[in-house]
Amino acid sequence: MGVQRLIVGISGASGCVYGLRLLEVLRNLNVETHLVVTRAAEKILESEVGLEIWEVRKLASQWYEVDDLSAPIASGSFSTMGMVVAPCSMKTLAGIAYGYSENLLLRAADVALKEGRRLILVPRETPLSSIHLENMLKLARMGVVILPASPAYYHKPKTIEDLVDYVVGKILDCLGLEHKLYRRWGEDKF
């Protein structure tokens, strides 16, 4: 595939900053992004970072309404390198685990699974119940990357942005995209 194309989902969990930063970095890496945001995420975006949905959509190459099941990303014939859901609420994670494709975000994740494409979920919940853990294990056994929003500290972060960049950098690592978002273990500097 000539163009690097990725679906980005933002669902209704705290931590929308991860999805926003991912969109910014992917734009700088010239990756074509296709965005879908749940209704709950729209409210959280306003509450946590003070952005309205139209401002978030400007970060993506293309965006779709969450109820638009006729969007290109709802079809396996729409070629992508995969999908990232950041943050991924436990409701969304459960929907993906059980094939409950009631909206476009869930359908796009279902397509990534059925087409054998990379699917990365960034859960942002604590503590985790046994239901959450069982759903994550079920998805991990299907090949889904479960990438909790758990930053490391060996790179000596100084700001919240450093912590966010670490998690976004790990997402990019899973996608095979080079970056300089954090200092790797054993590196003296960037």
Image (tube, rainbow, N blue to C red):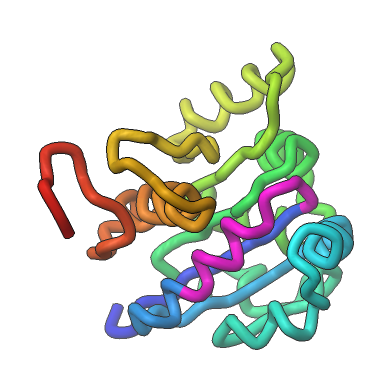
Q: How far across and how far down the image is residue 44, in percent?
A: 83, 57
Please tell me whether the stretch drawn in magenta is mainly helix, strand or loop: helix
Side of 34 where 94 appears, left or right = right
Which residue in the rendered view is the most extreme toward the front? Answer: 158
Question: Which quadrant does the N terminus fall into?
Answer: bottom left
Asked which quadrant contains residue 27, the reply is bottom left
Quick check: 180 above or below 162? below
Please check the rendered image and state whether residue 185 is part of the magenta-colored stretch, yes or no.
Answer: no
Q: Is residue 117 visible?
A: no
In this orientation, does residue 43 appear? yes
* Residue 162 against residue 30 in the figure, above or below: above
In percent of the image, x 68 and y 59: which residue is there? 10
Position in image of residue 119 (x %, y %): 49, 50
Q: Locate residue 128, reporting x and y percent.
A: 69, 20
Is 14 one of the magenta-colored residues?
Answer: yes
Give 148 or 141, whichever is nearer the viewer. 148
Q: Residue at x 11, y 47 (%)?
A: 188
Q: How many marks?
A: 0
Name the residue located 73 percent from the left edge and 42 percent from the top edge. 89
Direction from residue 132 to residue 50 in the image, left or right = right
Horizontally, residue 18 falls left or right of residue 41, namely left
Against 126, is 62 above or below?
below
Q: Which residues are magenta?
A: 12-24
* Residue toward you, 24 or 40: 24
Location of the C terminus by quadrant is bottom left
